[in-house]
Amino acid sequence: MSAARLPRILSSLLFGALALYLILPMLAVLIYSLARRWTATILPDGYTVQYWISALQDPRLFGAFVRSVVLAGATVAIDVLVVVPATYWAYVRNRRIRIIAEMAAVVPFALPWVAIAFGILLLSGRFAPALLGTPLLLMLAYAAVHFPFLYWAVDGAMAAADVVALSEAAETCGATPLQIIRRVVVPNITGGVVSGGILVFASSFGEFALVQMLVGGSFETVPLWSADALRATLGKFPELAVITFTTFMVLFVLSAILVFGTGAQTIRLLPGARAVEQRR
């Protein structure tokens, strides 16, 4: 074995081990959702699609799934519309607001989300009581809590793309700030927007504390349905396996479509990526 091939073999082994580590739990969930009965053997005693049929035909579960998807998608849209221009402005126009943005991005990780939800209730009750208990308040809360995932990805993408130099070149050509963001900045930070948007979507889809405290059962999402299924008398564990595997596949397919469909190369956001590309 040549020394030149050793790093490639080691990286292939590492990738295979990582893929196996990620695939095995979801494979177990899929098998459990198809198991007729699973006792002391390594594999189920029999298989059935009954749980898949009952879960997919459940109007309550379908409604919760649709609400979760719409809510997570709207959260991503709000965060992209707010974070990208704000981060660009912090890079090009006023770097002092970066301190404020970074401090705001730390808050969701420094405080329990139950405390954040309680603070949102107090603030909304004082200044906008009409929003209490509405999906709009939940959507705005999601956008405020999950934006750090997008902010850090976009911030790294802008640093890698050197948006300051790009902006100066575009201004020299007579472009307006809106044209610079839409035609120059966004095409060069697609990888950051895509990777951050996927994280925002996934975390919003599975959020439980905020939806429980802000809207309760009046706007049931998949996490609320799952909690109720766990508290059921007989337990809907096979149906939970069905919705867990379905959610994983939806997020996986969506991530693949966004990454390959937009041509995003998120590898460029990693430290040392430029050096690797130069060696090639």
Image: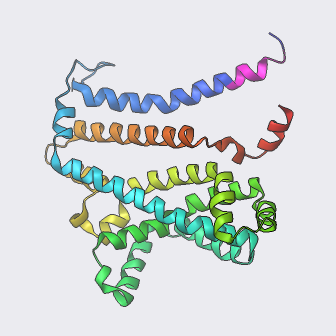
- Res 184 → quadrant: bottom right
Query: What is the residue that sits farthest to the bottom in this orientation?
Result: 126
- Res 71 → quadrant: bottom left
Q: Is residue 225 magenta?
A: no
At which x and y percent is residue 277? 80, 37
Residue 160 vs residue 215, the one in the foreground: 160
At which x and y percent is residue 216? 26, 67
Against 213, is 228 above or below? above
Answer with left or right where residue 225 lies relative to residue 266.
Answer: left
Q: Is residue 207 visible?
A: no
| Color scheme of the displayed model | rainbow
Query: What is the residue that sits farthest to the front in this orientation?
Result: 174
Residue at point 40% right, 73% down? Answer: 117
- Res 70 → quadrant: bottom left
Residue 228 vs residue 139, the one in the foreground: 139
Residue 133 vs residue 43, the one in the foreground: 133
Dominant SS in magenta: helix
Question: What is the quadrant of the C terminus in the image?
Answer: top right
Answer with left or right where residue 237 lies relative to residue 142.
Answer: left
Q: Is residue 81 visible?
A: yes
At which x and y percent is residue 10? 71, 23
Q: Is residue 10 magenta?
A: yes
At which x and y percent is residue 213? 32, 70
Residues shaded magenta: 3-11
Query: What is the residue that sits farthest to the top in this orientation?
Result: 1
Residue at point 31% right, 19% down? Answer: 43
Answer with left or right where residue 28 lies relative to residue 85.
Answer: left
